[in-house]
């Protein structure tokens, strides 16, 4: 039985290892935890979620929902585990982080074709390999990747704080789902204009954590995971048109729409912990406590975790990778995960599925699985392997990367539904022909 190595036990690595094992290959899955942790990781289990516990929308007529549907069609391990560990989150699929990680870890450990090795990998092995070491890859492995690939690009990513539900002031908050979609799973902290403007002033003048000297020249915030203080610095109303937009919500105490609303989402199925939606931050911890406690309902909040910010790396993938996630010029070396330029939990996992399936097909002497661009997974693979390299930036699932529909559809939801229907039909046809 051919032995294949997967380096990294994150979402992409676990999906890649699963696909290879299901194809009948012996897999060595190398994961450095608990011997070593990155600045963003804390739990020893596999597939740890670090930024948010939300896997985004479930609706099939959304980019995130379509992506998960395609992954399910391709035998995703993580979508199965996500559904089993889901917590109420309106129209989104959010999970209990610990339970999700535990389910993935148990499945991986139980597979007869996977051997989980606890080791700090320092170089790309000579065996057929998928490198899924993540956007925080450093040390000797980072140098070896640079040796193989040349220079890397970088951006900064950030995580939001988590607070105790018990410590919230229940008189100042209310449960509701925006636009009435789904159940009332979100906690809403309404602000009037005076409260919002005071919060805004405190936020933009709060002291931020120091960046390491070597990171300063690389400081480029990724737009899809922007620290709240950076967003606020772009103008007084930017937050009100972003994560604090009050549209679709009514404060039951006043009967009116608030000036702004901070939303909190469940972290655990028991509802003991909530995260501040859209509040990724690089403020110093005491400043987070001071400023975020100004939010109505959070005056006496206990913070289980403060927000953190860290430097991420990704490859110049259009120059380096093929659409099957293989490294150009290296026959049995594949990459997967955020380091390839896909952005998001499920996007990372989806790249692992395709890398795993394609390495398996390569070893079986079969042609690569290059999904049609009408599918979300195919469009992402095409983007990271062919986007302009002048200013390559990570890309998450969105309807804008899909080819235009042949007919013009005016309604947004109807248009997105047509995209989804076409994608799933094309995927089904492609898989039947592929055999």
Image (spheres, helix red, strand yellow):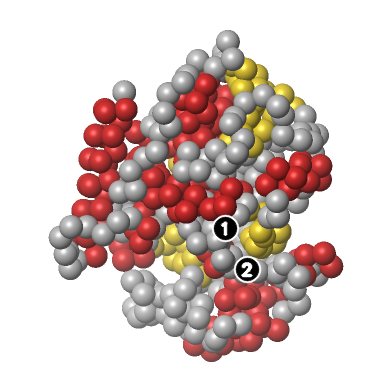
Q: Position of residue 43 (x, y in %)?
A: 69, 40
Q: Quadrant of residue 399?
A: bottom left
Residue 270, position as x, y percentages in the image? 52, 44
Q: Which residue is mark 2?
A: 221
Percent coordinates x, y for residue 148 in the rendering: 70, 43
Specify whether 65 is left or right of 77. left
Instruction: Name the residue tied to disc 1.
Output: 275
At mark 1, the secondary structure is strand
> In which quadrant will I find the C terminus?
top left
Q: Are marks 1 and 2 in contact (CB under 8 Å)?
A: no
What residue is at 55 percent from the left and 45 percent from the top?
A: 321
CA–CA distance between discs 1 and 2?
21 Å
Which residue lies most toward the front here?
Answer: 329
SS at badge 2: loop
State whether residue 383 is above or below residue 358. Answer: below
| For residue 352, above or below residue 154 | above
């Amino acid at each position: 039985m051919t032995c294949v190595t997967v380096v990294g036990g994150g979402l992409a690595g676990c999906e890649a290892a699963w696909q290879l094992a299901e194809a009948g290959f012996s897999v060595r899955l190398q994961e450095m935890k608990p011997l070593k942790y990155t600045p963003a990781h804390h739990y020893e289990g596999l597939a740890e979620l670090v930024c948010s516990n939300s896997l985004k929308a479930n609706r099939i007529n959304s980019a995130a929902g379509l992506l998960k549907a395609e992954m399910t069609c391709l035998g995703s391990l993580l979508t199965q585990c996500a559904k089993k560990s889901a917590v109420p989150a309106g129209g989104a699929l959010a999970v209990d982080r610990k339970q999700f990680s535990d389910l993935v870890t148990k499945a991986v450990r139980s597979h007869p074709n996977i051997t989980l090795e606890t080791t700090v990998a320092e170089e790309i092995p000579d065996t057929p390999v998928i490198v899924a070491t993540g956007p925080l890859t450093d040390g000797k492995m980072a140098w070896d990747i640079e040796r193989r690939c040349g220079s890397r690009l970088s951006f900064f990513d950030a995580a939001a704080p988590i607070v105790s539900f018990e410590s919230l002031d229940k008189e100042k908050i209310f449960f509701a789902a925006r636009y009435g979609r789904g159940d009332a799973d979100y906690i809403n902290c309404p602000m009037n204009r005076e409260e919002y403007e005071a919060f805004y002033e405190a936020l933009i003048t709060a002291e931020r954590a120091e960046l390491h000297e070597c990171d300063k020249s690389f400081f480029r915030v990724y737009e899809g995971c922007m620290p709240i203080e950076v967003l606020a610095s772009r103008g007084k109303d930017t937050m009100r048109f972003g994560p604090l937009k009050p549209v679709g919500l009514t404060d039951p105490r006043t009967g009116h729409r608030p000036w702004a609303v901070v939303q909190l989402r469940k972290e655990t199925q028991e509802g003991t912990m909530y995260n501040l939606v859209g509040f990724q931050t690089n403020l110093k911890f005491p400043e987070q406590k001071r400023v975020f406690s100004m939010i109505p309902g959070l005056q006496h909040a206990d913070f289980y975790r403060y927000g953190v910010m860290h430097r991420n790396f990704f490859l110049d993938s259009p120059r380096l990778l093929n659409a099957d996630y293989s490294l150009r010029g290296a026959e049995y070396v594949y990459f997967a995960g955020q380091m390839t330029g896909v952005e998001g939990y499920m996007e990372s996992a989806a790249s692992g599925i395709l890398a795993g399936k394609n390495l398996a097909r390569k070893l079986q002497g079969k042609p690569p699985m290059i999904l049609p661009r009408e599918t979300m997974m195919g469009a992402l693979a095409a983007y990271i392997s062919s986007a302009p390299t002048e200013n390559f930036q990570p890309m998450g699932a969105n309807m804008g990367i899909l080819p235009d529909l042949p007919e013009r559809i005016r309604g947004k939801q109807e248009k997105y539904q047509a995209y989804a229907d076409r994608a799933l039909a094309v995927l089904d046809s492609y898989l039947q022909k592929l055999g």
